[in-house]
Amino acid sequence: MSVISFRRIKDAIDDVVDYLVYTPENVSIELEKSLNKISGENFSSKVDLPPYPKSTMDGYALRHTDISGASRDNPIPLKLIGSITMPFKKYDLKVGEGECVFIETGCFLPSGTDAVVRIEDTYREGEVVYVMKTLAKYENVSLPGEELKRGDPILKRGIRIKPWHIAALRLHGVSEIEVLNLRVLVVGTGDEFLEGLHIPFTLSLVRQWFIEYGFLKAEEIVVGDNKDEIKRIIRKSLPNYDMIVLCGGTSLGMKDYLAQAIKELSPDVYIHGIALKPGRTTILSAISGKPVIGISGLPVAAYANLELVISEILRRWLGAEPIIKPRVKAILTRRVTTKSGVRALVRVRVYSRKGSYIAEPLLTGGSGSLRSLLLSNGYLVIPEDVEGFEEGEVVEVVIHSWF
Amino acid sequence: MSVISFRRIKDAIDDVVDYLVYTPENVSIELEKSLNKISGENFSSKVDLPPYPKSTMDGYALRHTDISGASRDNPIPLKLIGSITMPFKKYDLKVGEGECVFIETGCFLPSGTDAVVRIEDTYREGEVVYVMKTLAKYENVSLPGEELKRGDPILKRGIRIKPWHIAALRLHGVSEIEVLNLRVLVVGTGDEFLEGLHIPFTLSLVRQWFIEYGFLKAEEIVVGDNKDEIKRIIRKSLPNYDMIVLCGGTSLGMKDYLAQAIKELSPDVYIHGIALKPGRTTILSAISGKPVIGISGLPVAAYANLELVISEILRRWLGAEPIIKPRVKAILTRRVTTKSGVRALVRVRVYSRKGSYIAEPLLTGGSGSLRSLLLSNGYLVIPEDVEGFEEGEVVEVVIHSWF
């Protein structure tokens, strides 16, 4: 049986991150399949949008100096010499003094012009257009680069790819994008799974968490409570993954095969036990510069680890943008406590009453309580330096749904 | 040229939703591919977890009445009659008065026992275990249904599927799940796209928004500025999609082919013009009970429509859980205004300074400004009943990233 000391989460993460010297590789994937993946590249705009001055109205393109003084009482006539109706086409038209061209929204201004008068501010007699309004230079005109300028940052390595990034890359004719090729192997340990006595459902929670984070691969394998087999799997798999998460068997009890297996692989750093509730039996280690992490096989303890420990390791290791989650201030219906020095995750059910948010802690069932995850729509964190929150106190709650 | 009146957004949505009588169908998909899709079914737990009383410690299973009065000074001996080390296995062991069984964490209690004493609170001499602590009934025991109870709600139609839902269904041996089979066709209109003069990049923004929302299909097609062709596409496609979004050509200008096309298809309801900035030329209609919506081809106007109009239509039509976005209170660096009665979306860049959030409005480039979407990390909404917000005012901002 190992003797465990519980490290503060921040200290434990500080220590581990120093040894994560492996840098995940980039991989090129289809642009339209990159939503919410983590960018592996920097990309700046190589184009100006619009490329040329563009009309934002239906009207007449003209020289604004030609119509100074124009008004309803003093309409100024211009000679209509052509018509531009195809957006984004360069017309071979030159507009001289006293002349104008009919132009539709989205079309490039012909050379010689610097403003567009709206149709509503004109009337027409044959080939003569009467303008009833003065215009500033570039009025009703979108100037080159106004919508997107050459050199504008579009992507930075580490950001989460959103619909507007995909749109901006498409504008560049790009159809593939470099993303971080993040691959995690989730190893479930337990003879009961191998024997078919129980279903390792926590593995799905863990894998799906990584997929939501932006991992391209989150695969799983189940092994028995067998130290040598666990060592073999880690050694064999590590070259093909960026990180390994072992799930189950981190307990303080007899079955610490997992702790022994990791220790015998001579990790660069090894921490067993962190001041997290639930989830204190967590193992943090680095092998070949990659994170090898042991977490509980119980769903709430696994979730607390993912949200409060692993997400922070990923942020610092990868420089990757975390998923930002909504937070609300809510009134606590019941006292919640933790031991001093321990950070606790408490599942809560948040609801709205008379314009305030109310947070009801779901304390039943301990770290195995799948139902507390299903019934909760968020959680609160009790930090190390407070012992808890009182009934009626206003606390900050992380929300993951309204249902 | 159509005459447009600008309806209040809420009134326009109220009117349209009444006519959305089509109900999207369910489709069965792989469970592990259902993350963030919209559930099409209700599902309640059919199992108790644990199914039998389960030890939460390594120790000895016993009858708590046998050791009343036990202490370090008064250890009470029990006869060790067996050992239980395989979790989730039913052992054929019956424990009588004065007897105990060695048990590991996660294993089911043998019949006759009702508590588990931790190894640390015992010592052993041969086949006799001395217990040095009294226990309450069920101490260190997880009772049937404590982690998940038969009848506990797992899924409701309309919720967004999260990792814990997938884990809970896997526990039931389920490998497929019914989700809403949401399919949108995004139609880009514009001769400039057909001629290859410009790239319809806004279509990617719109499609990816729907994919993030939980649509299974978000396909696109590009047509020219041709009323009959647009009509043909809508008529032909509507049976194969749940909704059609036409993008571009909703302007007040000459090219209102799109408005004409929709009108000539005799929609059940037709609204052209809503009090949204940018995005006022929006067309909301219902054909065959499905939404047929025309939005601007300019990215900011399209985005304002998606966030403020289409998401609300989907919520009310489908009863689907919206994506909840983080909101923060931030101090405005500049005055922002809108016409009374108009709801406005203003892109902002939010940053943290001296412990406060600061929101800087990005006002450049109008509704075509892709760069304002790229540079912003959130937006604020000016509601209809205020004319704007002052410099220095604290406003609520929706955030989509911290970068």
Image (cartoon, coloured by chain):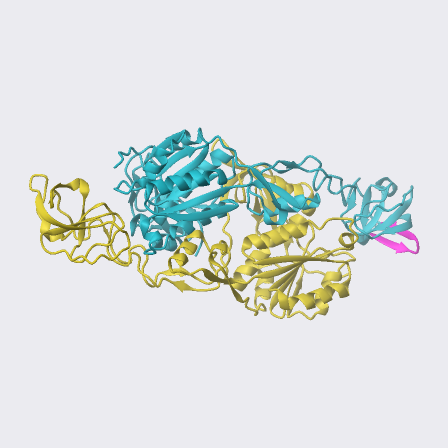
Chain colours: A cyan, B yellow
Nearest to the observer: residue A392 or residue B65: B65
Name which quarter of the figure residue B310 lies in. Answer: bottom right
Residue A90 in the figure: left or right of residue B12: right
Image point 62% across, 47% down: which residue?
Answer: A30
Check the picture and name the quadrant holding the N terminus of chain A: top left
| As drawn, A298 above or below A273 | below
Name the dominant secondary structure of the magenta segment: strand
Residue A178 in the figure: left or right of residue A115: left
Q: Position of residue B137 (x, y in %)?
A: 17, 53
Stretch in magenta:
A122-131
Check the picture and name the quadrant holding the C terminus of chain A: bottom left
Image point 58% across, 55% down: which residue?
Answer: B210
Q: Position of residue B360 (x, y in %)?
A: 58, 38
Nearest to the observer: residue B358 or residue A205: A205
Nearest to the observer: residue B140 or residue B264: B140
Q: Is residue A130 magenta?
A: yes
Name which quarter of the figure residue A177 lies in. Answer: top right
| As drawn, B165 above or below A211 | below
| As drawn, A75 above or below B238 | above
Nearest to the observer: residue B100 or residue A360: B100
Q: Position of residue A160 (x, y in %)?
A: 55, 42
Could one spot residue A189 in this view of the protein? yes
Image point 66% across, 43% down: which residue?
Answer: A169
Q: Is residue A78 magenta?
A: no
